[in-house]
Every structure is written in structure tokens, then in C-alpha cells.
Image: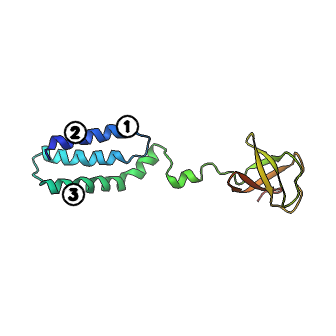
Amino acid sequence: MPAWIWLLAGLALLVAELLTPGGFYVLFFGIGALVVGALGMAGVALSPTAQWLLFPAVSLLALALFRRPLMARFHIPTREQSAAVDSLVGQRGIALADFSAGSYGKVELRGATWSARNVGTRIIARGQECWVSEVRGLELWVSPEPQ
């Protein structure tokens, strides 16, 4: 493939990265295409097979080496980080009604009403503070004392 086609493909992939939500995947394939095109423009004679092998090799190497630092630099959470970003465990809520140990009730937390289960050994009285020990779907497991 001519070098100018690789350069155009690389630029198109860089533009595609700008038009998609941040994930920094397409960027590295654009860089791979630009590297192959730059080598062709520099006079390095590569067979079409070598070009098609070099393109993914450079792209995947750049992806492996630079994606994580780039994500950290722009403060974009990775999948592992985003799973723990907004944990309610350990947060303090207020009981909206009395509910005994092992029973269900309602708790106000962060300005919203939540269904809650008292997993403690004591009654949680209306207006009493309680602490989230676990989140199960849309249900909070709370206890009258901090865990």
C-alpha cells in the first residue's frame, strides 16, 4: 500500500478517536498507521505483508505501553477503578421508621430513600443513625453501629 494511504488512514483514525468517548483505543491504531506511512515516506521499502504485520504490531505495542499512563494523566478511571468509585459501604444513613434486627425498613442516605435490611442485633429506631455494611442491588444492609 502506498505510504500516503497509510498516512491518511492514520489521520482518519486520530480524528475517529477525537469523535468517540474517551477510551484511547483508536488513537494507537492511528499511531501505528502513521508509523508505517512515515517509514514508507522515509524510503524504507516494506512489502505489503510487512506493512500489514508492522501496523498491528506497532499499534498493540503502543497500546500496551502508553494507554494506562495516558488514562492516568487525563484522570479517566479504568474499569477496576470505576467499580469502586461510589461505594456506599461505611456511609451513615438515617432510619425513617423503626425496624428490628433482621427486618426491613427505609433509610435516608445522601438525600434519597433506600430500602434497607437491619443486619445488626439491635432495633434501629426512627431518626437513629445506621451504617451501611453491604449493598445488594438497590437494597442496603445496615446496622445500628459502624462496622
Q: Circle 2: is it few (<14), some (14-19), or many (20+) Cα within 10 Å?
A: some
What amino acid type is highlighted by mark number 2? Leu
The crowding category of the residue bearing disc 1, from other C-alpha atoms within 10 Å (few below 14, some 14 to 19, many at least 20), is few
Q: Position of residue 64 (x, y in %)?
A: 36, 56
Instruction: Give the left or right position of residue 35, taking residue 79 as reference.
Output: left
Q: Among all residues in the image, which is located at the extreme bottom?
A: 121
Q: Which residue is mark 1?
A: 18
Q: Say which label, 3 or 2, has the lower sequence index.
A: 2
Which residue is disc 3 drawn over?
53
Mark 1 and mark 3 residues within 8 Å of each other at the beta carbon = no
User: Residue 98 location in percent, x, y?
Assistant: 89, 50
Q: Earlier in the sequence, mark 1 or mark 2?
A: 2
Q: Nearer the viewer, residue 69 or 25?
A: 25
Give the distance between the C-alpha atoms of the residues marked 1 and 2, in whole angstroms. Answer: 15 Å
Residue 124 vs residue 77: left or right? right
SS at mark 3?
Answer: helix
Residue assigned mark 2: 8
